[in-house]
């Protein structure tokens, strides 16, 4: 029996769309908060297969989502490349900002092996899922990971990373190629361990000129996927160039993704009109509506259902926030599956 999400990614439109939420495993769940106290820090949590597998499975047990998404982080790849990454409570990820002279020193050989604890997590989760629930593995897009490495943290404008790319094109290409190759090897390892779908989170795709988007997003992603496919990996790949605007169109045309995730800022109707009826789309409920609940949430869910045509996976336009109420998630799932969500 083919799992619902795999049916959609093969091009089939289902009467009831399958559903899962980005960041469904984590901070809004009391069972996660309890589990989190057992790890010394977030990186330790990600590298403990028993704990990471439990975190991955928690939303499946509670909500019966149609997919489990691996509990990990996009910034494990810099660790594999020999860089230090820490997560500071209240601040987020902190890295030593990458200098131009550091790029050549990045340790590409064996990078995926150095974070291979994640593959054991994938194996554990795959053994626990039923025949209807899909396991999704993932990595960060090369440009997104590069911005964190260059800037040392997340920031809104990404000007430091953009200046680096403009002023040091040769080193930027080397950095993106190393990230693409390491990320491809990481995805290959996840696929071999049991991931049934792979997803590329290019979270900082917004605000790039078409030329910079081509150089920093499209080319390294094409390189990554070619490396994955050349290793014999057949699993569907979902691309998520968040906030890419019209660059999303060139991404879909040039990058060999099986499906495209749509962010909150993009109309599902317009995306479908531009991309055609065959490409599977995923998205794109506004996470703020999920936080608000009630009639606001009900209208937002129905809008996504009304706008989606063709093969579609219901999801958020970004991730679940820490203050999301469990009853709101339950109402959305009931609405999608039965048409009768209990919105309060």
Image (spheres, helix red, strand yellow):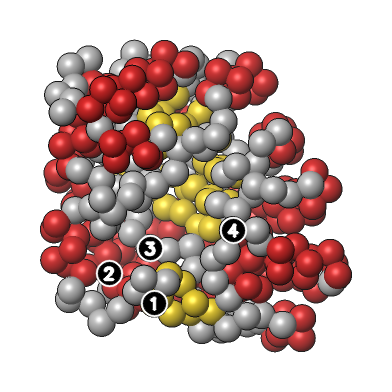
Label for residue 165? none
The image quadrant that residue 145 belongs to is bottom right
Dot 4: element: loop
Give the Cα separation between the discs numbered 3 and 1.
16 Å
Mark 3 or mark 4, which is nearer to you? 4
Dot 1: element: strand
- Between 338 and 13, the one lying in front of the other is 338
Mark 3 or mark 2, which is nearer to you? 3
Label 4, on which residue? 156
Label 3, on which residue? 72
Dot 3: element: loop
Q: Quick one: label 3, few (<14), some, or many (20+) residues within 10 Å?
A: many
Label 2, on which residue? 49
Q: Residue at x 71, y 63 (%)?
A: 159
Give the Cα separation between the discs numbered 3 and 4.
23 Å
Q: Quick one: label 2, few (<14), some, or many (20+) residues within 10 Å?
A: many
Residue 11 in the image: above or below residue 289: above
């Amino acid at each position: 029996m083919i799992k619902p999400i795999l049916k959609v990614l093969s091009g089939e439109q289902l009467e009831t769309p399958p559903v899962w939420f980005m960041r469904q495993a984590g901070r809004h769940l009391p069972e996660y908060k309890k589990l989190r106290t057992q790890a010394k820090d977030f990186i330790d949590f990600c590298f403990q297969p028993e704990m990471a597998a439990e975190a991955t499975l928690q939303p499946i047990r509670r909500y019966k989502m149609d997919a489990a998404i691996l509990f990990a982080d996009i910034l494990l790849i810099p660790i594999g490349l020999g860089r230090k990454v820490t997560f500071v409570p209240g601040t987020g990820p902190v890295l030593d900002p990458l200098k131009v002279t550091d790029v050549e020193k990045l340790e590409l050989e064996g990078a995926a092996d150095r974070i291979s604890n994640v593959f054991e997590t994938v194996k554990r989760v795959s053994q626990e899922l039923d025949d209807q629930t899909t396991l999704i593995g993932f990595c960060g897009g090369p440009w997104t990971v590069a911005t964190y490495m260059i800037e040392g943290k997340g920031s809104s404008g990404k000007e430091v990373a953009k200046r680096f790319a403009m002023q040091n094109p040769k080193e930027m290409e080397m950095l993106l190629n190393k990230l693409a190759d390491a990320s491809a090897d990481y995805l290959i390892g996840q696929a071999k361990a049991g991931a049934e779908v792979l997803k590329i989170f290019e979270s900082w795709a917004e605000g790039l000129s078409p030329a910079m988007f081509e150089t920093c997003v499209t080319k390294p992603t094409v390189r990554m996927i070619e490396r994955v496919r050349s290793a014999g990996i057949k699993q569907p790949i979902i691309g998520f160039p968040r906030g890419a605007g019209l660059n999303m169109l060139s991404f879909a045309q040039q990058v060999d993704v099986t499906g495209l995730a749509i962010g909150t800022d993009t109309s599902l109707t317009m995306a479908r009109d531009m991309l055609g009826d065959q490409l599977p789309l995923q998205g794109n409920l506004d996470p703020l509506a999920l936080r608000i609940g009630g009639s606001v949430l009900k209208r937002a869910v129905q809008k996504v259902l009304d706008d989606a045509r063709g093969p579609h996976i219901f999801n958020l336009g970004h991730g679940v926030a820490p203050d999301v109420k469990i009853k709101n998630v339950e109402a959305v799932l009931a609405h999608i599956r039965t048409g009768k969500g209990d919105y309060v």
